[in-house]
Image: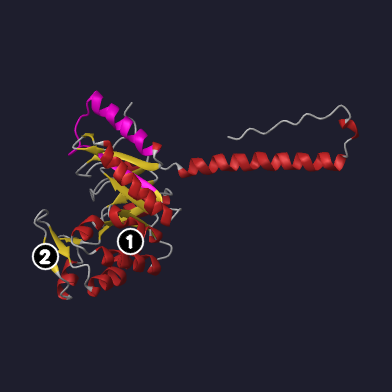
Amino acid sequence: MQHIRRYRFAPNSLTLDWSMLYCSLIWLASVVCLVENSSAQETVKTSSFVICYHPKISSREFAPYDIVVVDYAYPSKSIKKLRQQGKLVFGYLSLGKIQKERPFLSAAQSARIGLQQDIQWPDSFRVDAADRKWHSLVLESIIPEMKAVGFSGIFLDDLDDLKIRNLQDQGVSLIRQIRESNPHLKLMANRGLEYADRFSPFIDYLLLESCFLQSGSKRDSSDSDWALRLFLSAKEENPKLKGVAIDYISEKKIPLTAAQKRLILETSSLHKQHGLLSCVSFRDLQSVPSLNYK
């Protein structure tokens, strides 16, 4: 908070023009208001963030969080409850893959969109993101349906997979079209850091996943520096871009040791140190982590 400078009046200050004194008091009052408003704005900007993909998780478990990312299949009535509480609710959407349980898989197959079995994840198909029919399905069907069930944001996943398959140009194009078609929808992108500077003007949040921890232990600092450097490059293209971080303390929810709790606090502190909204969770993302590990 800024300190308001105290002015010392000269010995003959009693002869000061009263209109000048009045104006000075008005100016001081305005400065105080600006400082107070600035502090209030900083409080609003400090949000809590979580990702949980369990479709049957109770909306009550998200009570401590302001920004929530849930699965595409999360019930509409639960989304409505979260939004009534003033939360920003993102729904999951992969731009590079379709899980077998997704209701729009049959539409993709009927449209003859290029699909290939994902060897690493047997329950998913890799999508040919260069196929314009995929773009049309996303823009004209999938996202409108997500908006209809109540999502206020879309979480765009698997941008790194598009990079691996040399489809980043198509990814950038699709993200731009999503933004242009939905100017008021919040967009959060996961990974794709190598080309994030190209799509950052079209998104609101960029997620750095596993930036500080790997397999429940600290990563080499050079890995973190690499991700942070690319995030800053993306932010140069979009100064309003907000950074979000999620790291994993274990594969799934387990009773935590004292050392793990300390590591969670240390990791969360690193997130905040770099201006990132923080979440430390479990890799399967099937539970809501506590915010209190002291």
Residue 133 image position (x, y, % from top left): 23, 74
Using the rendered view, name the quadrant where residue 29 is placed: top right
At x 41%, y 49%, the residue is: 242
Q: Judge by depth and name the residue closer to the eye, 282 or 19.
A: 19
Q: Judge by depth and name the residue closer to the eye, 193 or 19.
A: 193
Q: CA distance from mark 2 to mark 1?
A: 29 Å
Which residue ends up furthest to the top in the rendered image? 258
Residue range highlighted in magenta: 243-272
Residue 77 image position (x, y, % from top left): 32, 55
- Few, some or many residues within 10 Å of mark 1 (<14, 14–19, 20+): some
Q: Secondary structure at mark 2?
A: strand
Pair 2/1: label in front: 2
- Few, some or many residues within 10 Å of mark 2 (<14, 14–19, 20+): few
**What residue does disc 1 label?**
149
Residue 150 visible:
no
Using the rendered view, name the quadrant where residue 147 is placed: bottom left
Q: Judge by depth and name the residue closer to the eye, 203 or 225.
A: 225
Question: Cβ–Cβ below 8 Å for labels 2 and 1?
Answer: no
Query: In the displayed structure, does residue 74 sit left or right of residue 30?
Result: left
Q: Quadrant of the C terminus?
A: top left
Against 207, residue 13 (above or below) is: above
At x 22%, y 60%, the residue is: 162
Against 15, residue 189 (above or below) is: below
Q: How is the rendered protein coloured? A: secondary structure
Query: In the displayed structure, does residue 287 sit left or right of residue 34?
Result: left
Q: Amino acid at mark 2?
A: Gln
Q: Amino acid at mark 1?
A: Val
Q: Does the magenta-highlighted stretch encompass residue 263?
A: yes
At x 69%, y 43%, the residue is: 30
Q: Secondary structure at mark 1?
A: helix
Using the rendered view, name the quadrant where residue 151 is placed: bottom left
**What residue does disc 2 label?**
116
